[in-house]
Image (cartoon, grey):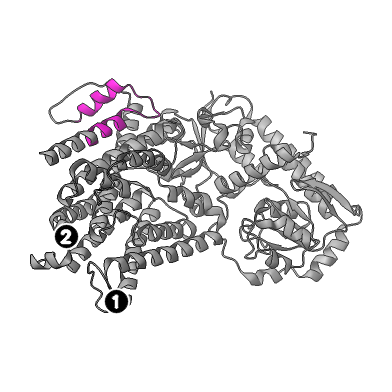
Amino acid sequence: MRKAGALGAAAIFLVAAALVGAMVGAADLNPLATAAALADKIPFVHLHSGLSPLDKAVLFQIRLPRVVLGVLVGALLAMAGAGYQGVFRNPLVDSGLLGASAGAGLGATLAIVYLGGSPDAIPAAAFIGSLAGVAAAYLAFAATTARGALSGAGGGGTATLLLAGIAVGSFLTAVQTFVLQRSTQDAQAVYSWLLGSLSAATWQQVTSVLPYAAISTVIVLLHGRHLDVLAVGDEEARALGMRPAAVRGIVVAACALAAASAVAVSGLIGFVGIVVPHVARRLAGPSYQIVLPLSLLIGGGFLVLADTLARTVLSPAELPIGVVTALVGAPAFVWILRGTRTAGP
Amino acid sequence: MKTPVRLSGAAIKAAVTAAAAAAALAGCGATGSSTSAPADAARTSPAASASATAASTGAAAAFPVTVTAANGAVTIKASPARIVSLDPTSTEDLYAVGAGPQVVAVDQDSDYPAGVPKTSLSGLTPNIEAIARYNPSLVVSSQSSGGLVSGMTKLGIPVLIEPAVATLDGAYAQIDQIGQATGHAAQAARVVASMKQQIAADVRNAGTAHKGLTYYWELSASPFYSVTSSTFIGQIVGLFGLKNIADAANKPSDGGYPELSQEYIVTARPQLIFLADNQAADGGQSPAVVAKRPGWSVIPAVQDHEVIGLNDDVASRWGPRLPLLVAEIAQALEHAPTS
């Protein structure tokens, strides 16, 4: 009952956050007219909003794709963070793990420095870089262990993969910094990207993320029960006929895909992937069958709210969204952690 | 027009900050062509520069000369025969005043005029030893990062820091100063006079018919960085009496380079859009690309084809090619709607 309630509340939070995001912005559209224009899009509903063509262009071509992209990115980052936390049985890991962020950063930097940073090149390069970063971390891990299998503890365990990810991440970040030093004039563009932004969101970005989002979400959600069993122990999982290493590999791959597609269109937005899963646990307990879908919903709502703040607090100027997620998220996180640290992940 | 820039301590600090901001924000210049060839350093041989110097001095034999740059009073004992420039604008200034034959090395981002002795030296992260290898008698840069001034001072090599300027007069004063420091004061004065005259003519010819037209100046598109009227660029466009939509977002904290909300840009309905990020190496946001941005078709500038792709390098430097930037703006106004 508590779980259904939490899911319902999270869904309402997501919808409310998206509505707030759609209603406010630098363009100062009339909220009632905006609501009418949105309702007009619902099948069988016909409303005259009174919005001018300019207002409609702002609402439907600029603001709405940004809101939808924010939902997708936040949901994917939070789900990937929760998935990784389950795989590694470690509450401190997040979606940028295993060289994913560093690889994306390197990809984006290469695109900016050597390809002129065209709007098409950066997401593609960041996407490939993120996946390549995770793949490199996995290869580094496999090279250090005899069997390359992800057992829960000891040699060849998940801890080794985490360490391999840290090594690969440091290496890729060093390469990225080196490349940037070769072309210091691109520093501003690169740092803007690293801070994360949804400011140039388009429907095209939404549709390019959607397939990866769908695939990774389905795979991760289907493995919630497996992660719960793994939390008990590899022996118990095997006794139930599961193959722990295979489960971990599949979830890691799906989470890497989710994080890569989010990072490709938004840059490096911190804090969502680590904080939101903890909020979900606080609301509904440690079972991944509930933490994963909750993270998806809360993450989407949280990022839309953060982005709404980013584009309205200093309106018509904007803040980097990474600043907002950490500035608002960190104190909120501490508050949530109050009294929950006995439960564990 | 007459006040030479004399920088107090606070002003230097402000100027250096502005330089950093401008370098970081506006400086999206020669990225594509910044592949460095160390061999290029040999292109201008010391012998050639020495003889050229001897020939070009004469009237300008005013050494030792002391000039007040952003790093304070700098004394140059003799006409510098070997100059290293670590900044694209400084490089352009040096060549414009006629000190080109004395330049032995320029940084990786300097690309104008053609044939400058480009090296892998970096102005942002200067390597003192690498600079010293060129045995310079004068180093010019826009910022003293990485201990450039203190390092060079230890080696007894004078350094001129010529940071990004805040005004046209500041740009003129820098050219004059670089002329004095290199023994080309007279030609520097001629360059400045010619620049003033060209800019004044373009502004005069544009008339007042376009006063009050609104514009959006794009430094980058993701996110949308712009400039306010208080910036160097803003002042230049302001010569034509145009109104800047970014002024609404002006805050001291961002140094005049705000990140604008896209929906604000669209609802502000600018009548002119200037793209300082339109070349392939700087983001490739050409007028055609801008016209295809979702939602932007309602902007008057897009509807009236008043989206102007600038020469990004000229638009991000403060050197002798500024009249070219002014001319680009003037040309755009020729077919702009009158206000």
Could you tell whether B218 is left or right of A244 in the image?
right
What residue sits right under mark 1 in the picture? A145
The chain identifier of the residue carrying mark 2 reads A
Q: Position of residue A211 (x, y in %)?
A: 22, 52
The chain identifier of the residue carrying mark 1 reads A
Is residue A208 visible in the rendered image? The answer is no
Disc nearer the start of the sequence (1/2) = 1
Closer to the observer: label 1 or label 2?
A: 2
What residue sits right under mark 2 in the picture? A232
- As drawn, A105 above or below B25: below
Considering depth in this image, is A195 or B76 the residue closer to the camera? A195
Examine the residues drawn in magenta and state their main secondary structure.
helix
Number of marks drawn: 2
Asked whether disc 1 touches disc 2, contact meaning CB atoms under 8 Å apart, the reply is: no
As helix, strand or loop, the secondary structure at mark 2 comes to: helix
Q: Do badges 1 and 2 share one subunit?
A: yes
* Residue range corresponding to the magenta coloring: A14-41
Q: How far, Cα to Cα, is label 1 from label 2? A: 24 Å
Q: Quadrant of residue A9?
A: top left
Tell me which residue sits at (42%, 31%) in the image: A313
Residue at the extreme bottom of the image, as rendered: A146
Q: Which amino acid does label 1 sit on?
A: Thr
Q: Where is residue A263 in the image (x, y as percent from the top left)?
A: 34, 52
